[in-house]
Each structure stands twice: as C-alpha cells, then as structure tokens.
Image (cartoon, rainbow, N blue to C red):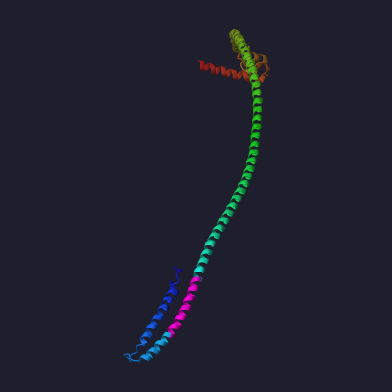
Amino acid sequence: MANDKHSGVGGFLFDGVRDLPRNVSWLAGRAAHPVETISGGDSVEILLDKARAAAERAHETERAALEAAEVARARAAEAKEVQDVERDRVRQLNKDVKAQVAERVARAQQEADERVERTKVEAEAEGDATISDAQAESDKRIEAARQEAQEAEQRAEERLSTATADLEEARRLADAASASAREAAAQAQRQAEQVASDAARDAESVQAAVAQAEQVQGRTAKAAGRITKRAENGSLPSQPAEMTKAQLLELAGAQHVDGRSSMTKAELVTAVRKASRKNKTAGGKGR
C-alpha cells in the first residue's frame, strides 16, 4: 500500500541498507582470524584492505541510499498528497461540472419553456386573429347569402303574384274564349242552317236557270233554224262578211258567242266564223 513506509522503491532500498552492517561485521570477524593466503591470489591483509574500502563505499552507498529513500518517501508522500489533492480536485470538478450541467440544463429548460410559452402566446394570438378574420368573412358571406335569399324570396313573391294575376287573366280569357266559342258555334250552326236554306234556294234557282237555259237554247235553236232557212231561201247572205251587224248579232246570239254586244262588225264576223267551225267539229265528233 502507499501508506507502508517499506513498500515500493523506498522500502526495498531501506531493507538492503539495513542488512549491510551485518555483512561488514562478518568481514571484521573474518579479519580477526587471518590466514596466510587465500587460494588464487592476495594475502589476508590485502583482502581486508579491500574489504574495508568496500565497506566504506558501502557506507557511502548506504547514506546515499538512505537519502534516496528519504527523497523517495518524500516524493511518495508528495505523490500521495498530489493524488489525494487531484482526486479531491477531480471529485470537486465532477461536482462543479455536474452543477454547471444541471444549471445549464435548467437554464436551457427555462429558456425553452419561455420560448414555448412565447410561441404559444404568439400562435394563439395569430390563431385568434385568423379565426376573427374567418368569422368576419363568414358573417359577410352569411349576410350576403341571407340578403340574396330575401331578394330571391321577394322576386318569387312578385313572380307568384304576377303568375296569379296571369292565371286570373288566363281564366278570364278562357271563359271569354269559351263563351266566344259557344257563340261562334251557335253562329256557325245558324250560318250552316242559313247556308242549307240558301243551298236549297240555290238548288231551286239552278233548276229554274237550267229550265230557262233550256228555253233559251230552244229559242236559240229555233233562231238558228230560222237563220239557216233564211240563208237557204236567199233572204240572208250565206257569208258572214255580207251580213249586216244586226244579222251578225242575231247569228252570234244563236251561236252563244260571249261579249258579242260590245264587238265590232269585223269582230262579229271572226267570232261567228270561229263558232261555226267549232259547231261543225263538234257535230262531226257527235256523229
């Protein structure tokens, strides 16, 4: 252990120096019983001199070793003191560092909490402003939609009123049209009855006209016969150009020439000749 004065380098040197005097005493005891010579060399005196010199050197070395041991023990004590001091310093430094870390963490946590709180306040303020703007915009849209709905309802009521009036007018017109239709039907029926009556009268008139035409035709045929006889017995010219206008008118009447009364003599001649050719053609086809 570091606290044992004989441990380490200092303890080893101290043990060696402590054993050294016994060795010197042993050499002195040997010197009290000298021998003539020692095999292989020097005499006892020479060897004792050498031993004494070696003992002196040993004493010097012992003193140096003791001094070195003292220095070593001092350095060991200093080293232990330094070790204790450094351990205390490291322990204190560890405490200080932990305290600093805890302080910095607490300060950082506080700053973070403050930043979080500021951010929360700012976010809430921004959120409130956004909600307020959105609410205002929503209120505007709701009011605009409500206004549009009211206007639409008013327009619908106006249109409904107009439609009701139009419906009443349509009903009135329908009633009037129905009355007019009934009146028209009655009038049409009266007109139909009148037309039927007129048709009956017209039929009678047509029959009378046919009878009159037959009479005229008979008279015309008779006139044509008379004219033909007159032409044959020489009392009437055989050629229309030789006839007088009165004779041509009489002949045109017998041939049913339309518009004869307004014709000139030349036109009567042409019309009579054309009617004569037409009568001849018709008579030939009849045969």
Q: What range is drawn magenta here?
A: 56-77
Q: Residue at 51% x, 17% y: name it.
A: 285
Residue 216 percent across, percent down from the top left:
61, 9
Answer with left or right where residue 57 lies relative to residue 142: left
Q: Is 284 in front, or is 116?
A: 116
The relative height of residue 193 versus residue 64 in the rendered view (above or below) is above
Q: Quadrant of residue 198?
A: top right
Residue 152 percent across, percent down from the top left:
64, 29
> From where the camera sits, is residue 143 visible?
yes
Per the image, is 94 magenta? no
Answer with left or right where residue 282 lies relative to residue 23: right
Q: Main secondary structure of the magenta part?
A: helix
Per the image, is 64 magenta? yes
The relative height of residue 32 versus residue 138 in the rendered view (above or below) is below
> From where the camera sits, is residue 229 visible?
no
The relative height of residue 113 versus residue 232 in the rendered view (above or below) is below
Residue 194 percent across, percent down from the top left:
62, 9
Quadrant of the image containing the N terminus: bottom left
Q: Residue at 67% x, 14% y: name it.
A: 246
